[in-house]
Amino acid sequence: MNTVLPAVGAMALTLTLAAPASAQVTPDQIVATYADIAAAKYADSLTTAQTLQAAVAALTADPSQETLVAARTAWLAARVPYQQTEVYRFGNPIVDDWEGRVNAWPLDEGLIDYVDASYGGPTDANQFAALNVIASPQITLAGQVVDASTITPALIADTLNEADGIETNVARGYHAIEFLLWGQDLNGTGPGAGERPFTDYVAGDACTGGNCDRRAAYLTAATTLLVTDLEEMATAWATDGAARTAVTANPDAGLIAMLTGMGSLSYGEQAGERMRLGLMLNDPEEEHDCFSDNTHNSHYYDGLGVQNAYLGRYVRTDGSVIEGASLSDLVAAADPALDAEMTGKLDTTMTALGAIVTAAEGGFAYDMMLEQGNAEGEALVMAGVDGLIDQTRTIERITTTLGLDQIAFEGSDSLDDPTAVFQ
């Protein structure tokens, strides 16, 4: 559901600015910074995915604990720039239409590979929830026999992903790769992540889990798809790319895209679907990075992405900085107190998300925070939720102050209608 802001009268944004001319920024300058940062973030996401691809190649060529750990480390590093791009969703249709290819969750992992008996089998909601294509060289989908003897990017993308139109049949992207590197996390709200052994990739009699050659082929194909998808989005934000052109062609519309992404990610997506919902259900399966126990970092870098968008500043993976004219500059010129409020609330949110990271890295993993009756965990998670909600209220005020047209932010039943969660 959506939280819809009241429509406000449009006005020329530059006329609202009260600062001296030398301090003024214009919407086209701000949107140009936004696009430049997007280009840098997607380029960094691509580069780190290519590093992951090389680590996967090393794992499948010479499976060992060392090469498995290296591939996991590369996956974790690849998440850092990517999560900061999520603020480009919602307001940019090109990104939102594409995002499901790379970051869809949750997934019914039994579609891909073996699972523990406690996982169960096919369900009324998804008859393919335990298909295990890695163990099945021939499968039947929608009454059609499919040759899956060779696992290729095309098989994953065109046949398996969202099979039968079911969103949880996620066969590609970061989380499919995560599952293949870590396996299921069977610890519930106890300590520990997935513990897939490297021998799941060893050929011959030492193979565990069966079908090690097909598992390696699936992991390789899924990683190839991820790199290809990120190449597409990096190109879309480069000079003359479709996404850059769409957001810069009308700078005022570009500002709306920026604020829509910031508000929707902060409120419905992160505060609601990714944080509050899991806490309400006390369900570690609602973790964003549930196999690797990396959810604390995913939340942190999502929040940082919103802050990046407002401040017009991004620190790249190589340590260099992309920065320029920002929404903060525009708001400060129109209403300095409102800008101070927004920057302060962003800092408060990042402090709360940082506390979750500190706790998780100290051994109090995010899924442990979701345990029913765990007051410390609930306090940590809810501080992040409250910060995200609070900053969204200020984003709403900013849209009014800047005289923008009507904006709808994504909502979540967990925030807007909690009783519906349990119906």
Image (spheres, grey):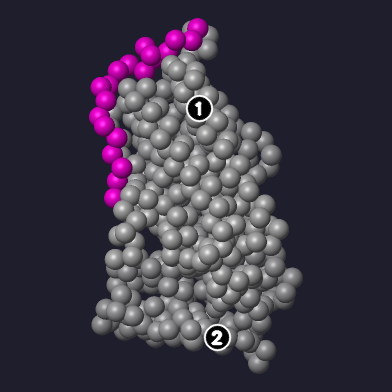
Name the residue: 53% across, 80% down: 214
Magenta span includes 49? no
Residue 21 coordinates in the image, percent (x, y): 49, 7
Category of crowding for the residue at label 1, using alpha-carbon neighbours closer than 10 angstroms: few (below 14), some (14–19), many (at least 20) = few
Q: Relative to residue 191, is residue 118 drawn left or right?
A: left
Above or below, 69 relative to 236: below
On residue 341, which mark appears?
1
Above or below, 226 relative to 38: below
Look at discs 2 and 1 and give the one toward the viewer.
1
Magenta span includes 2? yes
The span picked out in magenta is 1-20
The amino acid beneath tag 2 is: Asn
| Main SS category, magenta section | loop
Name the residue: 41% across, 33% down: 395
User: Of all residues shown, which one is farthest toward the bottom?
Assistant: 205
Residues 169 and 375: in front is 375
Residues 33 and 226: in front is 33
Category of crowding for the residue at label 2, using alpha-carbon neighbours closer than 10 angstroms: few (below 14), some (14–19), many (at least 20) = many
The amino acid beneath tag 1 is: Glu
On residue 211, which mark appears?
2
Residue 308 coordinates in the image, percent (x, y): 54, 36
Name the residue: 53% across, 24% down: 340
Q: Relative to residue 414, is residue 70 drawn left or right?
A: right
Q: What count of labels does the image hold? A: 2
Q: Can the viewer see residue 25 in this picture?
A: no
- Residue 335 location, quadrant: top left
- Residue 197 location, quadrant: bottom right
